[in-house]
């Protein structure tokens, strides 16, 4: 009877895009599982999409930790300078879009995601991608999970443009590093936990690259403000949490274990807010 008057509300989780942020995201999600947080849906972009997809399989993140911590550049880096040059010459300059095809990365993820469909996952999942064929940001919620993950992690120039279902895709972080729009508009969701990774990426010495990086940050900041206003209008609570880590790159994962531990610590340090223990649910019904 109570649920007829006050429909049950659910929590959601969003894992933001971050350059090699999968260490901290893994630790954060493990921490969420340990403190008892159970979102009805998870969305992710770029590295957040990869960890979000693994989480949505319903398995304990501890199972994936050894894979993440044991990752080496040779595991996902395809060939050497000579083979990369050979591939460039074979495809031609106009058809080349990145250093890596993504096949080695797909091989790493296949044992865990395989040919799973979104509809088969025990936790609802949404993956943000940048659809180049349609010139728009999309949140994929159906079809092959691994294909969507590969599209979302295809960082420009590092990975080739990913193609599936006759369309071209790049990193979800280009169009939306914080895919929460659909969560805000979903009437069944009232709280959204958002995890951001600040990896202290060095400022480039190249003027053009600095300008591009700054432009992305400016756009992200503006869209974040707009989402905050929309959430307020819809009566949704946004819980934005940040994990600070050392800089990680394809050439140096040495601080990955530390980043993972920091992510896990973020979940524990914010346990009360994440679980809503600081709120008064009776009064909350009338907000």
Image (cartoon, grey):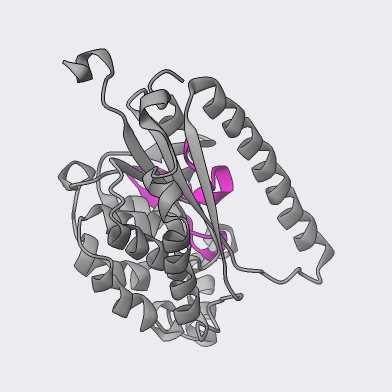
Q: Residue furthest right?
A: 207
Which residue corresponds to the image point at 45% horizontal and 68% vertical from the top-left?
A: 265
Q: Residue furthest top?
A: 5
Residue 140 locus on image (x, y percent):
36, 40
Q: Is residue 281 above or below residue 215?
A: above
Quarter that holds the N terminus: top left
Residue 65 locus on image (x, y percent):
32, 75
Nearest to the observer: residue 196 or residue 167: 196
Nearest to the observer: residue 124 or residue 279: 279
Residue 232 locus on image (x, y percent):
55, 26
The answer to whether residue 107 shows anywhere in this view is: no
The answer to whether residue 37 shows anywhere in this view is: yes
Which residue corresponds to the image point at 25% horizontal and 48% vertical from the top-left?
A: 144
Q: Is residue 176 left or right of residue 49?
A: right
Residue 4 included in the magenta stretch of the image = no
In the image, the segment drawn in magenta is 153-180
**Residue 9, quarter of the rendered image:** top left
Which residue corresponds to the image point at 53% horizontal and 73% vertical from the top-left?
A: 89
Q: Is residue 53 left or right of residue 220?
A: left
């Amino acid at each position: 009877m109570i649920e007829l008057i006050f429909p049950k509300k659910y929590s959601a989780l969003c894992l933001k895009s971050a350059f090699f942020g999968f260490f901290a995201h893994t630790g954060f999600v493990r921490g969420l599982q340990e403190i008892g947080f159970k979102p009805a849906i998870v969305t992710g972009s770029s590295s957040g999409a990869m960890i979000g997809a693994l989480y949505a399989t319903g398995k304990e993140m501890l199972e994936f930790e050894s894979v993440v911590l044991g990752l080496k550049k040779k595991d996902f880096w395809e060939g050497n300078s000579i083979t990369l040059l050979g591939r460039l010459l074979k495809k031609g300059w106009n058809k080349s879009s990145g250093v890596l095809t993504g096949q080695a990365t797909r091989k790493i993820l296949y044992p865990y995601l395989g040919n799973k469909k979104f509809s088969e996952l025990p936790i609802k999942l949404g993956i943000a991608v940048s659809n180049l064929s349609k010139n728009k940001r999309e949140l994929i919620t159906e079809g092959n999970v691994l294909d969507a993950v590969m599209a979302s992690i295809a960082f420009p120039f590092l990975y080739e443009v990913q193609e599936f279902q006759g369309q071209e895709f790049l990193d979800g972080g280009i169009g939306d590093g914080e895919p929460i729009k659909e969560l805000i508009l979903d009437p069944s969701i009232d709280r959204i936990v958002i995890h951001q990774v600040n990896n202290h990426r060095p400022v480039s010495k190249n003027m053009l690259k600095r300008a591009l990086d700054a432009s992305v940050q400016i756009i992200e900041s503006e869209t974040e403000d707009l989402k905050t206003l929309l959430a307020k209008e819809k009566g949704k609570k946004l819980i934005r949490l940040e994990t600070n880590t050392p800089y990680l790159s394809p050439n140096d994962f040495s601080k990955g274990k530390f980043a993972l531990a920091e992510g896990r610590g973020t979940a524990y340090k914010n346990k009360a807010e994440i679980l809503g223990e600081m709120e008064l649910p009776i009064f909350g019904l009338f907000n």
